[in-house]
Image: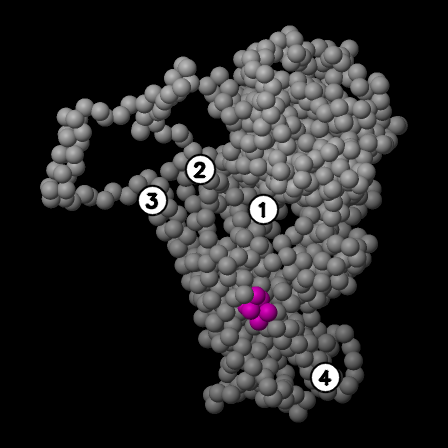
Amino acid sequence: MPQNIDYNPEGDYYNLNTYLEEDTENEYADKDDDISFNATRYSDSGSSPFGIEVPPAGQQPRRSKTVKRVKLFRGNLVLDCPVSERITEKLTPERRNDREFAYMRYSAATCDPSYFVADNYTLRQNMYRTPRVTELFIVVTLYNEDDILLGRTLLGVMKNIKHLESRSNSKTWGKDSWKKVVVCIVADGRTKINARAKALLAALGCYQDGFAKNMVNDKPVSAHIYEFTSKIGISHVGETVTLKHEDALPTQFLFCMKEHNQKKINSHRWFFQAFAPLLNPRVCVLLDAGTRPGSTSIYHLWKTFDLKPHVGGACGEIKVMKGSGGVQLLNPLVACQNFEYKMSNILDKPLESVFGFISVLPGAFSAYRYEALLNNTNGSGPLEKYFKGETLHENADAGIFESNMYLAEDRILCFELISKRNKAYTLRYVKSAYAETDVPNKIGELILQRRRWLNGSFFAALYSLVHGCYVWRSSHNLIRKLMFHVEFFYQLITMIFSWFAIGNFFLIFVILINSMSDPALNFAPGYILSRVLVWIYGACLIACFVLAFGNRPGGSQPAYLVMVIFFAFLMGYLLFAVIYLSIRSVRMTLCENNNQFTVQMLFSNSTFRNLCVSLASTYVLYVVASLVFFEPWHMLTSFVQYILLSPMYINVLNVYAFCNLHDISWGTKGDTAVKTDLGVAKINEKGEAVEMEIPTVQEEIDANYLYHLKVVADAPVEEKKVPSADDKIKDYYALMRSSVVLLWVFTNVALCAFILNFIPDYRGSDVQTSSSTCGTTTLVTTPIVNTYLGVMLWSVAILAAVRFVGSMTYALQRIFGW
């Protein structure tokens, strides 16, 4: 058998042939699992993968059903399984003699992830005479993504490993860098994994059918773990996945296929609690299947940890996949999200990085220092808080605040890192690291995605504000702690604006359209449009609430699409109103000053000052910041779409999110236990008959019959209905949802009612318009409304200025290496 002189297996469990005892002769039968392998999609020669002849579509491959006795290793089922000769024949003679390239290791885990180490499970990297040091431990979480999405992520990872190998002058990287990187793929449910994704993993050599079992030693298997070092690479991912053998570096794969679907947070538990303690990596990188990291992005993330020992977590830029030639940007939803992502990475992430606390490190592409995540000896710490949300739904005492907070568990992890007791970890944004991902291209998908984002973000931000004093238990210096509190205050202000966003938008809308109905402006359609648009706006808003309370977004896409189109038209009219009013105010000011122009003269006009300052602080700031970061192209391709669709975020996404606060389920905890209340039918020792308990005595049959007759004859006893524990929890969450929505609606309505009371009706007989021979003099004629408008628009300008200053400070940090 091939042997690796560095390999130090304990006992003979690696060599199946040394102790596997054949009980029956070989038989061949169709495979039980529903999986087919379409070779043309994985072809590097044009007909079949590696020249393998595969069955026609729909026909299952034949499987050996040889029965063998297998010894347990340390009480666990662990096997070294030979891989296909089609894989080994492509290896060099030296590689062919390395066991890690010739055998796939299978382990059947029958425990919870937290007991993986205690139950004596091991990983290949620990089995060498000199255990391998893992510098980078990369996890790819997989649900039902297909081979294209998975292949896209693995291609990016392989390119990063190749880049690490090429850094010959590095103290850490260079030749054999692949030995310091382990790629862990965690599939969330054996029945949920996409058949083509599983076929791709099999083509890479890190999965084989036939070895996984449901039970081991009367214990149910919770996860199937496959380990293999693959010399097969991915050369291209387009409509198909193209594999290659030449110029492919080895990749250490650890494929964990969970038996049940238990959600992404449980997949991270396997990564952090089961595998990471055995490998003790320096840096852990988190990726979602479908997210493609840049070819050097993982190195740049690692370099941040290497140069800055106080950094506990880092993230790069998430880019939107635009398709070939940017074709995806033709979809306004994709273009809108592209602009949103870009400006967040230019303004928001740099600002938070300067303070040292990034509110969220996206699970799709982020990295953590493993040491920083570890709990203390009492079991409390960042990871304990991170995984608390997985079992929170089982706790009847958990409130809706806590439950929604853990919808954004990655935000909780970020706060726990910076406030870790007696530590001084900060979070950092790494602009040079990026990853591309698909974004929702349908309104229904976008609404569902943002529900979790918005609710989790809101309550998690509230958590950091309430527990802000925890940063004083850390060992940060005084300046850093004060900077954290400045950021918390900034978050508080943005939260208040988010809470009143729907009311403020409606008020600005009413103020502008009412101003357009002023006869002094000589805009004839202004009055009619102001009345019609208000009624349509109200109808759409009511429809948003009705749909949010009782309909699936996917089933209501036509209705949502109509509302999004209306809000886009509405935003277009508001922009026209702002420009029209600004031009009129400039003309009026010039007329009053005998056409003598000065800058001071312009800003003496309150209408021009309020409108232009708010516009300049947002849109002009976008342009300037984008130019400073040398990324102006999204301004050309996505700016207009973002402006027109921005009301959608306030009136559609926010409404759905708040109306579904009670939706906090973390998974499908169905009734999966095997019931035995009916008895069990057993095959006898000879296998010729079934042994089962059945009534055969006539008296027993008669007694059963009389019992049921008595039940029918007796009057029914009135049973007092007592709500179950689950019903009580659901009722509580629904009540709290309704309470929060009512509070949100009433506070916004109160704000609107107060301000609307002071907005004049220009067609009313009791309104005195303020005009002169030069035209209208102000936007509105009431001081209260002017004050409100000034506060709102200048607040927007101040918040934008804070973002811009933070962005420029981050740019200076990058230049000077601070």
The disc, 1 or 2, on the residue closer to the chain's N-terminal end is: 1
The residue identified by callout 4 is 587
Mark number displayed over residue 727: 3
The residue identified by callout 1 is 488
Q: Is residue 23 left or right of residue 152?
A: left
Three-letter code for the amino acid on which mark 4 is drawn = Arg
The residue identified by callout 2 is 669
How far apart marks 1 and 4 lie (CA) works out to 43 Å
Q: Dot 4: within a 10 Å radius of its alpha carbon, few (fewer than 14), some, or many (20 or more) residues?
A: some
How far apart marks 2 and 4 lie (CA) works out to 67 Å
Q: Dot 2: what SS?
A: loop
722 and 352: which one is in front?
Answer: 722
The disc, 3 or 1, on the residue closer to the chain's N-terminal end is: 1
The disc, 3 or 4, on the residue closer to the chain's N-terminal end is: 4
Q: Residue furthest right?
A: 169
Q: Residue 511 location, x and y as percent?
A: 56, 75
Residue 792 visible in the picture: no
Mark number displayed over residue 718: none
Asked whether disc 3 touches disc 1, contact meaning CB atoms under 8 Å apart, the reply is: no
The residue mark sitting in front, 2 or 4, is 2
Q: Residue 459 location, x and y as percent?
A: 51, 47
Q: Residue furthest bottom?
A: 773
Three-letter code for the amino acid on which mark 1 is drawn = Phe
The residue mark sitting in front, 3 or 1, is 3
Image quadrant containing the C terminus: top right
> Which quadrant holds residue 493?
bottom right
Q: Dot 2: within a 10 Å radius of its alpha carbon, few (fewer than 14), some, or many (20 or more) residues?
A: few
Residues shaded magenta: 561-566
The residue mark sitting in front, 1 or 2, is 2
